[in-house]
Each structure stands twice: as structure tokens, then as C-alpha cells.
Image (spheres, helix red, strand yellow):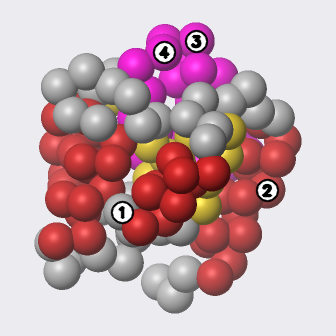
Amino acid sequence: MSSIVVVDDDSDIRGLLEFKLSAAGHTVTAEADGEAGLAAIMDVHPDVVVLDWMMPRMSGIEVCLELRKDPSMADIPVLFLTAKAQESDVQRGFAAGGNDYVIKPFSPRELSSRIDALLARTPR
């Protein structure tokens, strides 16, 4: 189906997303910090990226900004999955180039639906 890179420093969330998204037919690559996540994104060139905001070594915002600078990666949809819930945080996520924003705690079913919506809107 589609390839998805998940970058989150919480191992439980990574495991849950790997399981749910793989069960839905996606190929999932998961990383625990921003630097490793950016390297995986550059290597895999996924159809969608799911980014936590607060991570070691490089934040999700920094990863997203780096992706948007690279013409070969600039069109990859990015969904922020984060506990940062203030309106200003959401605005900052979209300003950094995010395409969607989901606040933790989250519904795995809703997250999967949002990923499907991003995939449907993105030409491949």
C-alpha cells in the first residue's frame, strides 16, 4: 500500500502505530529521535510522515522544516502527533509545513483515517 515513517520517542506509541498501520497494509519505518527519523525519511522517501514534536536530538518541528527545504522531500505530507495542545502550538506546526495535527492522547482509528485522507489528497 503506502510507506509511512513514524518518528516518536515514546516506544509504546511507536509500537502501537507500527502495529495498527502495518495491519492496515502500510509499510512502516519507526524511529525514536528526530535525527534518526530525518535519516529514515531521506532513505525511504515515504508517502506520509508522522512526527512527534518533542524528541531528543532534533524536534519534530526541526525535522519538518528540513524536509520543506529539500525539493525532493517538500511535498511529503507531514502529520504532527503531539501533546503540544495550545492553539499557538497548532499554528506553529502548520507554519513549519505540517499538513495535519493530532493531539495526544489520540484515537488510533482517527489517526489512521487522517493518514488515509492525506494519502488521498497527495498525488503520487
Residue range in magenta is 2-30
Whether tag 1 and tag 3 are in contact, CB under 8 A, the answer is no
| Amino acid tagged 3 | Asp
* Residue that mark 2 sits on: 113
* Residue that mark 1 sits on: 96
What whole-number distance in Å separates the C-alpha atoms at marks 1 and 4?
22 Å
Foreground: disc 1 or disc 3: 1
* Vertical position of residue 27 compared to residue 19: above or below: below
* Vertical position of residue 104 compared to residue 49: above or below: above
What whole-number distance in Å separates the C-alpha atoms at marks 2 and 4?
22 Å
> Residue 80: in sight, yes or no?
yes
Give the class, few, some or many, for how many residues have Cα within 10 Å of label 4's Cα (few <14, many ≥20): few
* Residue that mark 4 sits on: 10
Disc sitting over residue 12 in the figure: 3
Q: Considering only order in the chain, which callout, 4 or 2, is on the residue closer to the N terminus? A: 4
What whole-number distance in Å separates the C-alpha atoms at marks 1 and 3?
26 Å
Whether tag 2 and tag 4 are in contact, CB under 8 A, the answer is no
Whether tag 1 and tag 4 are in contact, CB under 8 A, the answer is no
Q: Secondary structure at mark 3?
A: helix
* Vertical position of residue 52 compared to residue 101: above or below: above
| Amino acid tagged 2 | Ser
| Amino acid tagged 4 | Asp
| Residue 23 found in image quarter | top right
Foreground: disc 2 or disc 4: 4
